[in-house]
Image: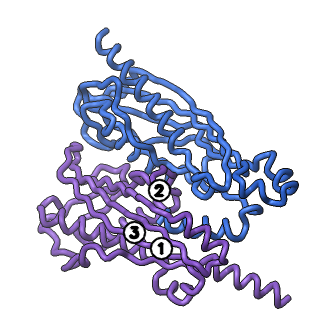
């Protein structure tokens, strides 16, 4: 659905308003392919529903559900824990409970400052030659808490990813904005810290 | 006045002149709904994008699109009458199904440019290959079964498709496809005795 309908939108945009329109889509919740964990914890983990507390995030309720399942899949594929499941459930006493909270969740699209003047001066050649039209700015900030099954917090980590990139008419991001790579980087960073932290915690 | 109305009408027509066609795939699930088990269990279902790609590049699946997939999946679960209740994922249940939809898309960029330049006289085409992977788990989180179903849908864009479009509206075709993949999944799980 996404490709077909987005493709319709893309062709319409190219034909009708490549120099005039402004494409803006809500931030998604998917993650990229999981790379193997550099440290694995030989215990199971349960993932609490992910919370997006950023009040400016669009579609936060829908994204929370999707991100919960996406992170579960990522943890499983990367192999950070011997197994991972979603709460509610029946964790055993030696398993961990993971809680992700995203306090900043933003993908913003701005008009590139050189776009309007250069497109006018060059009578549109700037656009077709692949000059930057938009600037995509991403801000993600999150914390990961690790607790035991009694609810006692063992570790907590926080991290953020801020990025920006130019978008031209020929960029894959032109009609299909994405922040999946930045989100994946943040989730992976937190999981890596947690895996090392839990390993050190277990040896104490 | 009339010129403006004509331009508006033309823009409206060409901006929606696209139609989708399912690639066929497996025959419709029959019988539907299946005969329910004597003791039905409650289930919670959670669905997310399992990743989207266009021509090999990762893209975000818009949350609105995933919300549609979830609504259609919930409707199929209810329609199946195989469960005593379909509960929210935050509520404990006998079974949990975790559904991931992987959308591998292919868009013909050359055709798209030609289509735009010729004001939709030359056709453009995009293909969505949708894979529905469902993990059925019990309350302890143990995986009972993983079932995968997939099918493709082709979307064409061309001015004269306006006459075909009402019968092959892209959203309707995808809804039918997601529904059918879910039916096939539930029928297989039912045949295996999981639900």
Where disc 1 sits, the SS reads strand
* Residue tagged 2: B55
Please state which of the two labelled residues, at mark 1 or mark 3, is closer to the viewer: 1
Please state which of the two labelled residues, at mark 3 or mark 2, is closer to the viewer: 2
Residue B54 seen by the camera: yes
Q: Residue at x 33, y 60 (%)?
A: B131
State the residue in front, A45 or A178: A178
Disc 3 and disc 2 on one polypeptide chain: yes
Please state which of the two labelled residues, at mark 2 or mark 1, is closer to the viewer: 2
- Colour in which chain B is shown? purple
Mark 2 closeness class: few <14, some 14–19, many ≥20 residues within 10 Å? some
Q: Chain of mark 2?
A: B
In the image, residue A110 sits, relative to residue B78, either above or below, namely above
Label disc, if present, on residue A164 of the rendered structure: none
* Residue tagged 1: B155
Q: Residue at x 41, y 58 (%)?
A: B104
Q: Which chain is blue?
A: A
Q: Position of residue A63 (x, y in %)?
A: 50, 50
Q: Quadrant of the C terminus of chain B?
A: bottom left
B11 relative position to A7: left or right? right
CB atoms of marks 2 and 1 within 8 Å: no
Q: Position of residue B69 (x, y in %)?
A: 42, 64
Mark 1 closeness class: few <14, some 14–19, many ≥20 residues within 10 Å? many
Q: CA distance from mark 2 to mark 1?
A: 15 Å
Q: CA distance from mark 1 to mark 3?
A: 20 Å
* Residue tagged 3: B72
Figure disc tally: 3
A106 relative position to B31: left or right? right
């Amino acid at each position: 659905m996404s490709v077909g309908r987005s493709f319709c939108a893309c062709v319409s945009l190219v034909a009708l308003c490549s120099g005039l329109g402004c494409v803006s889509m809500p931030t998604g919740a998917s993650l990229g392919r999981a790379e193997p964990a550099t440290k694995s914890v030989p215990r199971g983990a349960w993932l609490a529903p992910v919370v997006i507390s950023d009040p400016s995030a669009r579609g936060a309720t829908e994204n929370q559900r999707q991100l919960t399942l996406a992170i579960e899949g990522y943890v499983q594929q990367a192999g950070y824990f011997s197994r991972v499941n979603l709460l509610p459930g029946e964790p055993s006493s030696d398993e961990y409970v993971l809680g992700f909270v995203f306090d900043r969740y933003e993908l913003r699209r701005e008009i590139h400052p050189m776009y309007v003047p250069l497109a006018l001066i060059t009578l549109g050649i700037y656009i077709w030659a692949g000059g930057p039209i938009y600037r995509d700015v991403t801000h993600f900030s999150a914390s990961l808490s690790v607790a035991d099954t009694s609810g006692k917090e063992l570790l907590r980590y926080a991290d953020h990813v801020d990025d920006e990139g130019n978008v031209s008419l020929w960029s894959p991001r032109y009609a299909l904005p994405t922040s999946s790579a930045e989100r994946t980087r943040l989730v992976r960073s937190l999981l890596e810290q947690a895996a090392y932290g839990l390993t050190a915690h277990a040896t104490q | 006045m009339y010129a403006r109305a004509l331009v508006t009408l033309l823009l409206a027509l060409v901006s929606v002149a696209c139609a989708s066609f399912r690639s066929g795939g497996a025959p419709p699930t029959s019988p539907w709904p299946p005969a329910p088990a004597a003791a039905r269990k409650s289930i919670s279902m959670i669905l997310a994008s399992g990743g989207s790609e266009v021509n090999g590049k990762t893209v975000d699946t818009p949350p609105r699109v995933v919300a549609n997939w979830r609504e259609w999946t919930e409707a199929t679960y209810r329609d199946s009458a195989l469960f005593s209740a379909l509960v929210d994922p935050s509520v404990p249940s006998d079974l949990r199904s975790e559904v991931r939809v992987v959308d591998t898309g292919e868009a013909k960029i050359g055709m798209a440019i030609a289509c735009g330049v010729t004001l939709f006289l030359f056709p453009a085409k995009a293909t969505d290959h949708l894979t529905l992977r469902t993990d059925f788990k019990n309350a302890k989180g143990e995986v009972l079964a993983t079932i995968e179903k997939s099918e493709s849908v082709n979307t064409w864009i061309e001015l004269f498709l306006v006459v075909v479009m009402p019968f092959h509206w892209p959203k309707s075709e995808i809804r039918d496809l997601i529904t059918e993949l879910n039916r096939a999944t539930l029928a297989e799980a039912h045949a295996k005795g999981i639900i």
